[in-house]
Image (cartoon, grey):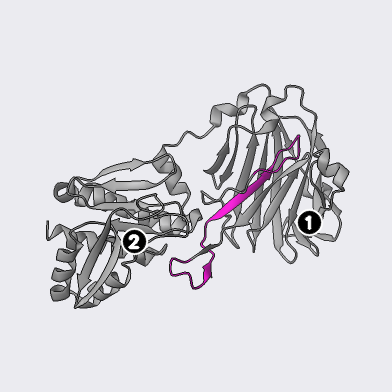
Amino acid sequence: MKKHEIGLSSLTPEGKVALTPQNGGLLMISEGFSKRIPRTMEEKKAKKPIQFEEYCARVPGAYALPFKIDLTLTANSRRLKLWIGKGYIAFIGTFFRSYNGNEKHQPEGGGIHRADVLTGKPEPPKYDFDANLPLNETATLSVIYGSKAMWVEINGRPCYVAKNAPYMAVTNKERLEIALSCDRGVELELKSLAVTEYENDEPVIGVPELSAYEWFLQSLPRELREEAVKTDQFLMESMKRVFKFKKSIDKEGVLAYISPCGLQYRLRRISFGETHYLSWDQFNKVFAKLGQTDPAFAEKMFANVRKNITAKKCQQCDSISCCNMKTIEYNGKSKKACAGAVQFEWTPSAFEDVRKLIQAAGEVV
């Protein structure tokens, strides 16, 4: 193992980038964007890797895989990109439509777009984890390129793992240059930078091994992750005697809590722009009771009853047409929904509503 502590004053700007010493660190402000350079038809046929016109700060030297890049920084935006060899790893925001379809929201979660460091081949963006840096506060970012896995850690928390990158299949690896860039107008203050080169598979020892449930939690922004854990404890502990929930995660990453009495709570990854929802064929009893004890909450939950059918398929049934449509009635009104589904937005208050509605359901079992 050989660790290189990079002096921040040794970074060199390329393109419209200003580097200014500040508070013992280095303030980086870009006046331009890293733009894709158009390829000719011949280059496309030859599958030449996509190249970019770079606006970046270059790190001196070149480094042999496997290695680890450690950064300590403060930023006022989460749009950050590391250029490594022929590839890059970019931290990007996550946009999805709210379940009512009226407007776009940007939750605290984010994604990663990666291109291979040796081939330059881009991979599809990944949004199924919270990969956003904290804003306007000091944070640590580590990117590890091992021979059998590459992963990212933010403040010591693993938030991305890939085990099938093309560079892993190459035995004789060239030394790679490293650079750092950010979007125009972003103020990025670097406090420290280090690159550690390893021998053989040394960094693989630290590959994070998380359960499917733990990886699901990593897909949620911090404030929603906390609410999801509260809800998990509520279902598996507080409501254990009433509903006896069993927890599972399917191959598509859908987290499900299923009770023998038929009550189900399912959460699809937030990156898919879908909702989390409760379904039960006895919700008519629940709404009838709520109408007497808490009519305002009953009205709010009844407004969340909807078919949940997208242009392609019913999200609950996973088929073109719903095969289990139920009618829910309240206060002289009725709605049809798959398995009597009540849907919820991705907000902390929505998780509170989930727990409150399940509590109400427990009173009619």
Q: Earlier in the sequence, mark 2 or mark 1?
A: 1
Q: Is residue 230 visible?
A: yes
Whether 99 is among the magenta residues is yes
Q: Which residue is mark 1?
A: 34
Residue type, label 1: Ser
Where is residue 15 drawn, in percent x and y?
A: 86, 57
Q: Nearer the viewer, residue 284 or 52?
A: 284
Q: Nearer the viewer, residue 202 or 114?
A: 114
Per the image, label 1 sits on a secondary structure element best described as loop
Q: Is residue 108 shown above or below 253?
A: below
**Residue at 52 percent of width and 56 percent of height:** 109
Residue 347 image-quadrant placement: bottom left
**Residue at 73 percent of width and 22 percent of height:** 171
Q: Is residue 60 visible?
A: no
The quadrant of the image that shows the N terminus is top right
Left or right: 263 with respect to 188?
left
Where is residue 320 drawn, in percent x and y?
A: 41, 53
Left or right: 140 with respect to 120?
left
Whether 292 is among the magenta residues is no
Q: CA distance from mark 2 to mark 1?
A: 39 Å
The quadrant of the image that shows the C terminus is bottom left
Per the image, label 2 sits on a secondary structure element best described as helix
Residue type, label 2: Phe
**Residue at 54 percent of width and 31 percent of height:** 206
Residue 351: image tag: 2
Residue 285: image tag: none
Where is residue 37 drawn, in percent x and y?
A: 84, 52
Q: Are marks 2 and 1 in contact (CB under 8 Å)?
A: no
